[in-house]
Amino acid sequence: MIIIGRKMTLEISNNRRSEIKTLVLSVLNKYGEPCVPVKIGNIIRNIPNIKLITYRSQIKKFNITYEEMIVDAETRDSYVVWDSTRNRYCIYYNDLDYTIVNSNRVRWNLAHELGHIVLEHHKLCKHHKLFRDGLSSSIYNYLEEEANYFAQLILVPHVVLFAFKVSTVMQLKNLCRISNNAAEHRFRAYLDWKKNMQENVTYDKSLFRFYYNFIYKKHCKTCGASMIQRSGKYCPICGTKTIQWGDGNMKYTKLDTYETGKLKECPICHNEETNIEGQYCQICGVQLVNYCSNDNCSHCEVLPSNARYCPVCGASSTFYTFNILKSWNYRNDAQTLLPDDIPFGPDEELPFN
């Protein structure tokens, strides 16, 4: 907790860093979606008591010039105004300066202002607006440091950089969509994080779980299937070795199963009383759990109910072997999804579970 009125240093304590990390995870889980670049504007719009307002709209509303807007705002970047009576916030940001917008600095500005709000800096200082003249330089600088720390955590998730084998400043800049200056600083911080990865294990594991589906989303170039697949090089739908990172354009229907992977209805005799012990239908004897048919395969886990092939060894699944599933191109049972792509592929050997 920050104590106003005492001498402060710019160094954020380890306990405070842990608190900020917890708040970042809370914001992501409540209002975000697992993707990079982080959709910071959408996160802010999803928070009920925060409103985004552009400099352009204010200039038009009050019939003032751009220069007058900057004087009134006291910044060329962004700022927050807090309505204490209704506990509402307005984030005003510069959408007219193309050096800010085109460099992606505006994304950092938005994340920075969100940090001030989430960390409750306005309430702490009892100011509707944080500005240099209204606070001591030590307090103002410390609050800025905390807001920047929040921004770097939410915009530059290290576990995702690690997963996609980011090795240059430019790759980090393009993946996270931040400015050149920010990317240079964050890349140095990322290299330090890699050296001390185990020190952040609790936070990193939580962040990894949040981004898991994003990191391991893959699609097959042959059949277009979409999947979440951490290991294996074979497509579970068509059995080819043509899977790569990203969303596919086809989604193949899964058979309805219990959490164990056992079918709720037998596809042969249509027996619906399958929620009993065992893996076989008690009426016709067919196996109701999908496995790899290769007895020597190292993949012993239950396969998805739409898997025709094992993603590890490429052998047919038991459902496909016993004709429970038809060939992937037997009929068109797919739904179209939006495609996506990035220039790097994920590392399958992440040190998290």
Image: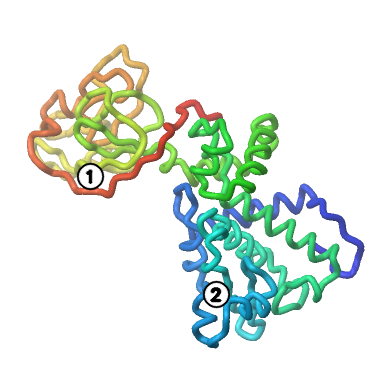
User: Considering depth in this image, is 76 or 307 the residue closer to the camera?
Assistant: 76
Q: Amino acid at mark 2?
A: Tyr
Q: Is residue 181 left or right of residue 334?
A: right
Give coordinates of residue 101: x percent, y percent.
52, 60
Q: Is residue 58 left or right of residue 81?
A: left
User: Considering depth in this image, is 276 or 28 the residue closer to the camera?
Assistant: 28
In the image, residue 169 above or below residue 98 = above
Q: Amino acid at mark 1?
A: Asp
User: Which of marks 2 and 1 precedes in the sequence?
Assistant: 2
Q: Is residue 350 left or right of residue 249?
A: right
Residue at 48 percent across and 44 percent down: it is: 211
Quarter of image, res 278: top left
- The residue pinned by badge 2 equals 55
Cβ–Cβ below 8 Å for labels 1 and 2? no
- The residue pinned by badge 1 equals 256
Q: Is residue 120 left or right of residue 278?
A: right
Give coordinates of residue 165: x percent, y percent.
51, 30
Local packing at callout 1 (Cα closer than 10 Å; few below 14, some 14-19, many 20+) is few
